[in-house]
Amino acid sequence: ETGVTQTPRHLVMGMTNKKSLKCEQHLGHNAMYWYKQSAKKPLELMFVYNFKEQTENNSVPSRFSPECPNSSHLFLHLHTLQPEDSALYLCASSQAQREGRLDTGELFFGEGSRLTVL
Amino acid sequence: AQSVTQLDSHVSVSEGTPVLLRCNYSSSYSPSLFWYVQHPNKGLQLLLKYTSAATLVKGINGFEAEFKKSETSFHLTKPSAHMSDAAEYFCVVSDLPRSGAGSYQLTFGKGTKLSVIP
């Protein structure tokens, strides 16, 4: 496999369930991202991990809990979600910028996990 | 601070006619600029990128964009639309990480939905 792979592609859960979204990248990148895409809203950055360390939490509610065990894997643990959390959750990866090194900032996206909260 | 404005939320063209999707940006630094495309229920795919080299950038599927610093614009064009071009298009600006190292700070536009009429 190549690129960024997300599983599951579709998930339906009740508000009391606990589930997880998984993302795996095979590009040798060191930065990974979770984005939320809701209808009629711009993409919202949720979390960023850089060399396995969380470097950004964009005021995301605690019912979303990220985990990055290594540079290739990223999880989003979900519990007691609300119906308004229904959205497409996109994972992305990139090269991490290092001091003095030029890079383009290109992100590589997975196909997303479509979450429906009942 | 950086921002992106996509001037049209929806563009409709006939098959075989030119496509113009407009994007204006603001950035404190010398940004990288990108256009991504998203087909229904899919992730985002990079169309093209500008990284301070040639101002006219050619991408995949016959798309190109011109970086105009004086106008702070990065409009996406294609000479002849194809039915398969129907999708949503996102203009993205990327500044360097705040500390000079780490993950990229991307700002997405709200998207332009392109419809192609047979």
Image (spheres, rainbow, N blue to C red):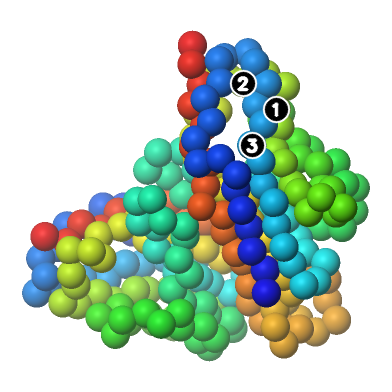
Instruction: Find numbered disc 2 in the image and state the secondary structure of the residue it sits on.
Output: loop
Q: Residue at x 70, y 83 (%)?
A: B98
Q: Identify residue type, mark 2.
A: Ala
Residue A93 place in picture, x, y as percent: 56, 66
- State the image quarter where residue A88 is shown: bottom left
Q: Which is more N-terminal, label 1 or label 3?
A: 3
Gap between marks 2 and 3 measured at Cα: 12 Å
**Which tag is nearer the camera, tag 2 or tag 3?**
3
- State the image quarter where residue B81 is shown: top right
Which residue is disc 2 drawn over? B81
Gap between marks 2 and 1 measured at Cα: 7 Å
Q: Identify residue type, mark 1.
A: Lys
Do discs 2 and 1 share a chain?
yes
Q: Is residue B71 left or right of residue B86?
A: right
Instruction: Find numbered disc 1 in the image and state the secondary structure of the residue it sits on.
Output: strand
Which residue is disc 3 drawn over? B21
Which residue is disc 1 drawn over? B78
User: Do the numbered discs 2 and 1 sit on residues whose CB atoms are within 8 Å?
Assistant: yes
